[in-house]
Image (cartoon, rainbow, N blue to C red):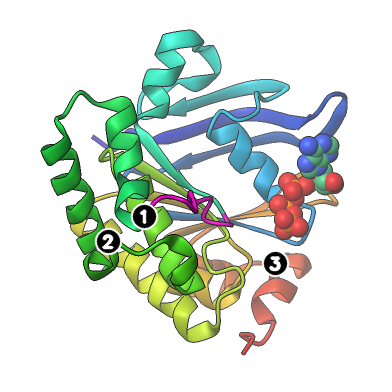
Amino acid sequence: MSEPIIRAEHLVCGYDDKVILDDVSFEVKRGEVFVILGGSGCGKSTLLKNLIGLYRPLSGRIWLAGEELTALDGAARLALYRRFGVAYQSGALFGSLSVLENVMLPLTEHTTLDAAAVELIARLKLRLVGLEAFADYVPASLSGGMQKRVAIARAIALDPEIVFLDEPSAGLDPVTGAGLDALILQLSHSLGLTFVVVTHELASIMAIADTALMLDASVRGVIAVGPPAELANHSPDDRVQRFFQRKVAA
Ligand SMILES: Nc1ncnc2c1ncn2[C@@H]1O[C@H](COP(=O)(O)OP(=O)(O)OP(=O)(O)O)[C@@H](O)[C@H]1O
């Protein structure tokens, strides 16, 4: 029952012969919000890119939803990709398409549903992120926070089991960022989605994370893992304390 939805075993990640993360192992429980944090350049994005299959680890193994990503190629790998959604930092929306068309895209590309069903599902996803009234807008006419919501609607279009979010609150004011945190929690609780979120926003980490994985460049790996309140209050590690004792930035 409590089989982890993600398992990373002895991951070594990097670029060519440059090792960024050395021997990283962790598990993500189904339904939790799992945050990857750490200072600039510690390898958060590198880990995320390996978890979503954009890069292959130099060694080690990754399981997603019971399948070993690191052992799959071709059609089997693509089939696994469909079981998770990704929203990138920039949103990466298509500017020439409407909000609705952006959310419809994965459905038209990856299902054989007819146009009416695709539109219905896309509108439902927009409703889940509070943007059904903006279906016909183009992304550029929306605020940064709204564009992030569209990216999340698109990431959940195919009813994934896991959603990966890269710096969702980057570039947002604190109030908008808090609204996005609330959306993540709501989707997690109401749909049972598992979220893996890369962020260094302390307020966001404290608000959303069930588990936080802290990376540090000095060890090229994990220096702490656990519920953020526990890390903040009980970690004996100076680097962890320094991170969590920062004032929550305004
Ligand atoms: N495509 C690449 N080729 C070579 N090195 C890279 C590449 N992408 C990232 N790196 C290096 O890997 C290290 C970790 O970068 P990464 O982007 O994973 O860190 P990060 O923790 O996400 O940082 P930030 O918070 O600043 O985004 C850095 O030294 C970076 O220069």
Q: Is residue 230 among what the camera can see?
A: yes
**Taking 36 as reference, is 176 left or right?**
left
Q: Position of residue 221 (x, y in %)?
A: 73, 44
Q: Which residues are magenta?
A: 89-98
Question: Image height check: is 222 above or below 54?
Answer: below
Q: In the depicted view, which residue is nearer to us: 215 or 145?
A: 145
Q: Residue at horizontal 24%, vertical 26%? A: 111
**Taking 205 as reference, is 30 left or right?**
left
Q: Secondary structure at mark 2?
A: loop
Image marks 2 and 1: residues in contact by CB distance under 8 Å: yes
Question: Image height check: is 61 above or below 87?
Answer: above
Q: Which quadrant: the C terminus?
A: bottom right
Q: Residue at horizontal 38%, vertical 36%? A: 84
> If you read the primary sequence from the N terminus, does the residue marked by circle 2 or circle 1 appear first?
1
* Mark 2–mark 3 distance (CA, rounded to whole Å): 42 Å
Q: Position of residue 179 (x, y in %)?
A: 39, 77
Question: Image height check: is 142 above or below 213?
Answer: below
Q: Secondary structure at mark 1?
A: loop
Residue 94 in the magenta stretch? The answer is yes
**Taking 127 as reference, is 34 left or right?**
right
Q: Residue at horizontal 20%, vertical 23%? A: 112
Q: Secondary structure at mark 3?
A: helix
Q: In the depicted view, which residue is nearer to us: 58 or 146?
A: 146
Image quadrant of residue 209? bottom left
The residue indicated by pointer 1 is 98
Q: Amino acid at mark 1?
A: Ser
| Mark 3 Cα shell of 10 Å, populated few (<14), some (14-19), many (≥20) | many
> If you read the primary sequence from the N terminus, does the residue marked by circle 3 or circle 1 appear first?
1
The residue indicated by pointer 2 is 135
Q: Amino acid at mark 2?
A: Ala
